[in-house]
């Protein structure tokens, strides 16, 4: 199987995203993470851009020793000198020289003839070759360059010493049907390409950066260039994570792989988003918030039965902890049942049908149904109906600097039972008293408390989880008195435990 060389330009083309300016520390932190991700080469910056950029690259070359570091320069002596300065201490440096070749760029931007373009490229590569063994030469705007001229430039560049030839789709003009063909033709017409690496670099102006990159891989390129989260000039670059996952998922088609450590993808995406300030769109492939979220009933049902029905990538593969089931307007009974079980309830089919009917009414009024809504719609009909033990009285005293709780419960036959217990704090005494009265063994797994609104008289909400025989039961209690809320939550969980056993849902996270 072929190995595709992954050239990451998050710190160069990615930093060309409008509004992005990374500090030295941020660039170094991203470079370290890119090395962990397993990219083969990191383009660390454009040293001629500013004295600070030279320092940025120098710091990166100190921190990253096992991954090749490249920098970009125009076909200009002073740009190459800045690159020499920046890469002086690098372990495996690469000089990347760019010069446009398309008629539009030659005429309007460079004001150069074809012969001048070839001469300028040759001079720059030969000058760079005195300092670097690895030189990448990019024919900027290659996808809009005449093929015959492209062959000529590529051949001259290789003769001058280029070790990588990069044919970029600088303005995102290419389409997969013809882009792959361009690489086949250039290989056929420039035999010397067999001795160097052939690369591509795509932009996303028409939303086809990854598609074009995959077409180039299919046509035989050795290296692809891209950025994390697809950031970059204008609409951005090919996103490295999309290519890595396409190779992983479609080995049957591309018969190629990469050195990317897939489960570092999500962490890397988060880091880049945090430092660049560019948020990832929720529906972005692989790293978007919704990439592993399922909202509609038919999909959720399929997912719960067998995740491969609706997921071609397992979230853990890219470092995401789990898929998400989002309860919304389009959700169905299977998802609701799973959610209800996840919250610690076990309903009969009839109760579930009733809860589902109520759920559909609630969702017509709200965009999302959160855990509170589910608790409310079930507690109204179910928990309250099945209550065995209820709090009937509670007295808290503090004799001689200790805590003592007198608790009275009514049981299912409306008999009143009482206990007075000392404890290490009110909740400890309260829960010990309840344990003594009910006499069932279980473990308190979790206790949490929060305020439902603002002010001294706010309603406190307590959620507890208790466990017995590898099963978990939860209970919720609300009261302006948080001790009473604690007692109610504990009793609800105990009533559910007594009533039956409920298995916790696994493998799925529910959004709330
Ligand atoms: C496709 C890409 O992404 S290429 C990389 C783009 N990245 C950057 O430009 C970031 C860093 N750039 C910079 O900081 C500045 O542009 C600098 C320092 C490099 C140059 O600044 P200036 O000298 O003021 O020139 P300016 O950027 O305004 O114009 C570009 C000049 O370079 C020339 N030029 C453009 N590309 C190239 C090239 N590949 N090789 C040689 N000359 C080039 C242009 O024709 C123009 O020349 P002119 O002044 O004779 O008309
Ligand atoms: C420097 C080159 C490779 C580039 O960024 C482009 O052509 O888009
Ligand atoms: Mg680019």
Image (cartoon, grey):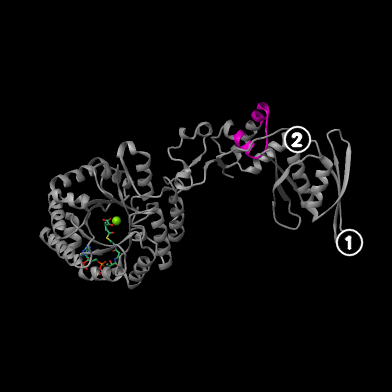
Task: Please provide percent x and percent y for residue 502.
Answer: 67, 35
Majority secondary structure of magenta residues: helix
Residue shown at 64%/28% (left/top)?
Answer: 353
User: Which circle's residue, 1 or 2, is located before the other in the chain?
Assistant: 1
| Residue 400: mark in rendering | 1
Residue shown at 35%/38% (left/top)?
Answer: 250
Within the image, what quadrant is residue 154 found in? bottom left
Residue 220 visible to an observer of this rendering = yes
Numbered disc 2: secondary structure: helix
Mark 1 sits near ligand 1, with its Cβ under 8 Å away: no
Of the pair 6 and 452, the residue shown nearer to us: 6
Of the pair 342 and 456, the residue shown nearer to us: 342
Q: How many marks?
A: 2
Numbered disc 1: secondary structure: helix
The residue range painted magenta reads 336-354
Task: Please provide percent x and percent y for residue 14.
Answer: 36, 58
Write down which quadrant ligand 1 falls in. bottom left
471 sits left or right of 32 in the view: right
Of the pair 360 and 194, the residue shown nearer to us: 194
- In magenta segment, residue 283: no
Task: Please provide percent x and percent y for residue 176.
Answer: 27, 42
Mark 2 Cα-neighbour bin, 10 Å: few <14, some 14–19, many ≥20: some
Task: Please provide percent x and percent y for residue 122.
Answer: 14, 62
| Residue 498: mark in rendering | 2
Mark 1 Cα-neighbour bin, 10 Å: few <14, some 14–19, many ≥20: few
Mark 2 sits near ligand 3, with its Cβ under 8 Å away: no
Residue shown at 54%/33% (left/top)?
Answer: 304
- Looking at this view, name the residue that lies furthest to the top: 350
Residue 175 visible to an observer of this rendering = no
Asked if residue 44 is positioned above or below residue 446 in the image, the reply reads below
Within the image, what quadrant is residue 177 found in? top left
- Looking at this view, name the residue that lies furthest to the bottom: 51
């Amino acid at each position: 199987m072929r190995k595709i060389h992954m050239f990451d330009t998050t710190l160069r083309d990615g930093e060309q995203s409008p509004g992005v300016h990374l500090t030295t520390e941020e660039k170094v932190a991203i470079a370290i993470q890119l090395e962990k991700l397993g990219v083969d080469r990191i383009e660390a910056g454009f040293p001629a851009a500013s004295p600070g950029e030279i320092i940025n690259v120098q710091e990166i070359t100190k921190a990253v020793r096992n991954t090749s570091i490249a920098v970009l320069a125009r076909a200009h002596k002073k740009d190459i000198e800045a690159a020499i300065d920046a890469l002086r201490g690098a372990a495996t440096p690469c000089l990347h020289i760019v010069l446009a070749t398309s008629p539009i760029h030659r005429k309007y931007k460079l004001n150069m003839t074809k012969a001048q373009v070839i001469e300028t490229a040759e001079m720059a590569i030969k000058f760079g070759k005195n300092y670097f063994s690895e030189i990448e030469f990019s024919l900027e705007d290659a996808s809009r360059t005449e093929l015959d001229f492209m062959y000529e430039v590529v051949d001259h560049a290789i003769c001058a010493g280029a070790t990588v030839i990069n044919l970029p789709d600088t303005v995102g003009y290419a389409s997969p049907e013809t882009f792959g063909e361009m690489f086949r033709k250039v290989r056929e017409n420039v035999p010397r390409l067999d001795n160097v690496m052939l690369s591509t670099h795509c932009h996303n102006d028409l939303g086809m950066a990854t598609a074009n990159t995959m077409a180039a891989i299919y046509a035989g390129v050795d290296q692809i260039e891209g950025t994390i989260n697809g950031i970059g000039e204008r609409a951005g670059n090919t996103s490295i994570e999309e290519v890595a996952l396409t190779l992983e998922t479609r080995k049957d088609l591309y018969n190629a792989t990469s050195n990317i450590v897939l489960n570092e993808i999500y962490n890397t995406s988060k880091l880049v988003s945090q430092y660049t300030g560019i948020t990832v769109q929720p529906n972005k492939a692989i790293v978007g918030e919704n990439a592993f979220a399922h909202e509609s009933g038919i999909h959720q049902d399929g997912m719960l039965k067998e995740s491969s029905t609706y997921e071609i990538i397992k979230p853990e593969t890219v470092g995401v902890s789990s898929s998400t089931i989002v309860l919304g307007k389009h959700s169905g009974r299977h998802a609701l049942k799973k959610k209800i079980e996840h919250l610690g309830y076990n309903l009969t089919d009839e109760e579930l049908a009733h809860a589902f009917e109520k759920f559909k009414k609630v969702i017509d009024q709200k965009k999302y149904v959160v855990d509170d809504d589910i608790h409310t719609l079930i507690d109204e009909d179910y928990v309250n109906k099945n209550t065995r033990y209820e709090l009937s009285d509670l007295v808290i005293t503090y004799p001689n600097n200790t805590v003592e709780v007198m608790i009275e419960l009514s049981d299912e036959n409306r008999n009143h039972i009482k206990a007075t217990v000392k404890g290490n704090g009110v909740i400890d005494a309260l829960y010990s008293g309840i344990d003594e009265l009910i006499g069932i063994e279980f473990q308190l797994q979790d206790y949490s408390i929060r305020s439902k609104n603002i002010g001294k008289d706010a309603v406190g909400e307590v959620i507890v989880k208790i466990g017995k025989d590898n099963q978990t039961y939860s209970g919720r209690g609300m009261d302006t008195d948080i001790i009473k809320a604690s007692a109610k939550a504990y009793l609800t969980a105990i009533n559910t435990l007594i009533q039956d056993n409920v298995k916790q849902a696994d493998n799925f996270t529910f959004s709330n």
